[in-house]
């Protein structure tokens, strides 16, 4: 499935149906009088957040949404049929912005949330409604109100509890593959992850969503590399896991680089709690991990976890720390209790713990 997190669409609600001009013509009825009915109401444009979607790719192929107009009134005082509402389904986490992207019109954060974006026009009056004691045979009617129309931008911010950040090749894809059943691409080159990936972690009876975004490099805020366009997908996360390659040239400098890009992006990311993890522990020994851990603490990290996304070593302790930042019940757990599936790409995994005999690691 292709990933698309922004789309521009055109919306137009339905116009109201016109009222009718009609007069009764019946045998043995001396004074028939007007009997033209009113027009029906036009259809509304309604947005609804649904489970099972995590991309806006559908809006690449369908960009115009027009609701039907109301039915026209008819004789014998028959009112026109009201048009059905046009329901546009969007993923949870979608924001609807004005055409200039300056105003957030709607923000969909829960499954089943519905918002009427545009109201359909009211139906016009038929001539029966104009009858008075002095106007016994009116011939006027209303054509029905026109519908509303507008261009809007849709912007998707994935709903995840925990976000993964780090330099390219820090092992984020391997890590998310280890703790979830996601199948992120892994390769021995930078930027193997080109779009955000979601996975569901099941750890000690808790379920939460983990998001992996493309790696950040120095100057990402100015557009270097893939840039910072995907950072919006971790704005809603409660905690960030900062993965650092233990085999890199300078882990402390790597941490400062990513921190600087998060600060430059803003939007609250600079204030989000972070858990620092030295990854690829299978490529180094404990003594080196401890030395690098001291450097990272000196650079500002509160605690440093040594982990291996390839073998699973140290992952359990890291996930234990993550649980301390989660609410009593995550959105995923609330949905599971209600029998609604989450739009994450892959199901939950029980493979996030080291096997028997493997060495476990606590914070350095």
Image: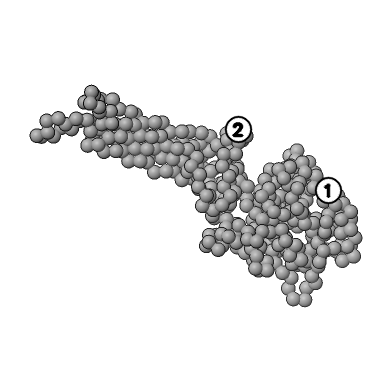
Q: Which mark is residue 358?
A: none
Q: Which mark is residue 100?
A: 2
Q: Secondary structure at mark 1?
A: helix
The quarter of the rendered structure image containing the C terminus is bottom right
Furthest-front residue in view? 133
| Any part of residue 42 in sight | yes
Quadrant for residue 227, please give it. Answer: top right
Which residue was labeled with disc 1? Answer: 256
Of 227 and 46, the residue lying toward us = 46
Q: Is residue 84 left or right of residue 48?
A: left
Q: Position of residue 202 (x, y in %)?
A: 65, 65
Furthest-bottom residue in view? 357
Q: Position of residue 290 (x, y in %)?
A: 88, 62
21 shown above or below 327:
above
Q: Is residue 76 left or right of residue 149?
A: left
166 shown above or below 73:
below
Q: Secondary structure at mark 2?
A: loop
Residue at left 57%, top 34%? Answer: 99
């Amino acid at each position: 499935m292709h990933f698309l997190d922004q789309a521009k669409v055109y919306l137009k609600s339905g116009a109201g149906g016109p009222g009718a001009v009609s007069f009764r013509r019946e045998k043995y009825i001396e004074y028939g009088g007007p009997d033209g009915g009113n027009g029906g109401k036009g259809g509304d444009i309604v947005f609804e957040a649904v489970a099972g979607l995590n991309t806006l790719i559908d809006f690449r192929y369908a960009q115009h949404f027009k609701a039907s107009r109301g039915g026209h009134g008819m004789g014998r005082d028959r009112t026109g049929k009201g048009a059905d509402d046009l329901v546009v389904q969007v993923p949870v986490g979608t924001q609807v912005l004005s055409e200039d992207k300056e105003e957030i019109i709607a923000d969909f954060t829960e499954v089943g949330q519905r918002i009427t974006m545009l109201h359909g026009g009211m139906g016009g009056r038929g001539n029966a409604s104009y009858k008075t004691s002095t106007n016994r045979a009116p011939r006027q009617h209303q054509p029905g109100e026109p519908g509303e129309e507008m261009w809007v931008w849709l912007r998707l911010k994935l709903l995840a509890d925990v976000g993964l950040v780090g330099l390219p090749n820090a092992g984020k894809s391997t890590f998310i593959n280890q703790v979830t059943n996601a199948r992120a691409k892994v390769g021995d080159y930078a930027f193997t992850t080109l779009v955000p990936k979601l996975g569901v972690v099941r750890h000690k009876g808790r379920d939460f969503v983990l998001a992996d975004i493309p790696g950040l490099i120095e100057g990402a805020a100015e557009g270097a590399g893939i840039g910072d366009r995907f950072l919006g997908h971790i704005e809603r996360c409660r905690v960030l896991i900062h993965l650092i390659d233990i085999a890199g040239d300078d882990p402390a400098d790597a941490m400062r680089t990513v921190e600087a890009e998060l600060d430059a992006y803003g939007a609250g990311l600079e204030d989000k709690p972070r858990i620092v993890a030295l990854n690829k522990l299978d490529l180094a020994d404990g003594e080196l991990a401890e030395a690098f851990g001291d450097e990272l603490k000196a650079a500002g990290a509160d605690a440093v976890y040594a982990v291996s996304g390839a073998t699973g070593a140290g992952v359990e302790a890291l996930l234990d720390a993550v649980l301390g930042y989660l609410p009593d019940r995550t959105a995923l757990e609330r949905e599971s209790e209600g029998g609604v599936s989450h739009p994450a790409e892959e199901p939950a995994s029980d493979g996030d713990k080291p096997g028997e005999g493997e060495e476990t690691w606590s914070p350095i």
